[in-house]
Amino acid sequence: MAFSKPFPLAQLPQKSQQPTFGPDLAVRLICPECRDPNPNIVEEFGSGDLVCGSCGLVLGDRIVDTRSEWRTFANDEGDDPSRVGAASDPLLEGMEQLDTVISFRDGGSGIARELQRAASRSQSSRSERNLLTAFRDIGSWCDQFSLPKTISDIAKQLYKRSDEEKLLRGKPLEAVIAACIFIACRQAHVPRTFREICNLTHVSKKTLGQCYKALEQAFNLAPGASAHSTSTASSSGPENLLVRYCNHLDLPANVQSICGDIIVAARKLGIADGRSPVSIAGGAIFFTCLLLGKPKSARDISAVAGVSEGTIKLVYRLYYKEKEKLVKQDLIDDGKADLNRLVLDPVTK
């Protein structure tokens, strides 16, 4: 069975696929003497025979022993040498994943250093070393950003595909990695802003944008699309940023849900169209906090969202003008929201 390659190129030419054949896994081996539908087949690795456990008929020979090649007599202490090495990494398929380490103890003759240089040249090519370096940087930056391993794996897949297609030749390695992490976050529905990625990787916003546009056009990427599918998904909106912002501001859970409803209602009415998702999220949080009587200063929201206080208050004024249309009547009837708490020019401490 052939698996699809992650991040396929956009508008690939259609090629006629040859039929693939594989073993029929529905075929079962039974003993011709017993003809038991549930046979008791025993693999005797010592003699290399496949024997029926009921009648003793030899069904096959030259069986390959797939068990551990070493034996250990330790109880529960120490490491079991029967299994050595880490699990194979599917991202490094086609590359040598076993390393040879040369000891530094050479009696001061300097032979060990020469052997290390010779081993590093012979073990991997320059492209493989660059790929391993990029994977290591992606893992370390995702750890610094407290991103899960899923996002790290998506970013590594995207970087490997861009390296195979030679899409970003001449671009700095840090910029390509930053673009891959940015796209991986959007596809995993935990988006990060350009400013947050730039602060983490120390890459200019212009260079990051160029790399992102090149990858987006080459692979026809859409926010929320998987690595094997390029189907169009809903764009990354400000409601996806509310979870982190509300957590950093120590706001209760109901503020996040009500704020999300207000953003959706404002989008349907065309309020604050053209504003960045970060600005809309900050202004909506400021509007919702005043509406529910849990005021947060524009300075605190500005520090979390990374936008100026004036931008937050500008979005708030746009929401204030249509406050009757944005707030559900159920919230007012239940006493959770009060439109009288909203003023045109709020002053919070």
Image (cartoon, rainbow, N blue to C red):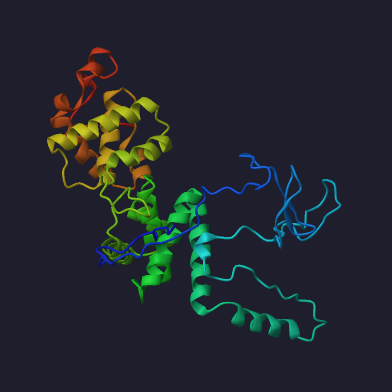
Q: Residue at x 61, y 82 (%)?
A: 122
Q: Is residue 223 left or right of residue 52?
A: left
Q: Pinpoint residue 161: horizontal percent, then vertical percent.
A: 39, 65
Residue 207 sits in quarter = bottom left
- Residue 295 visible (yes or no): no
Q: Residue at x 29, y 46 (%)?
A: 236
- Residue 25 visible (yes or no): yes
Location of the C terminus by quadrant is top left
Between 328 and 13, the one nearer to me in the picture: 13
Q: Pinpoint residue 220: horizontal percent, then vertical percent.
A: 27, 59
Residue 319 sits in quarter = top left
Q: Pinpoint residue 28: horizontal percent, then vertical percent.
A: 57, 47
Between 233 and 33, the one nearer to me in the picture: 33
Between 204 and 124, the one nearer to me in the picture: 124
Between 123 and 137, the one nearer to me in the picture: 123
Q: Residue at x 85, y 50 (%)?
A: 74
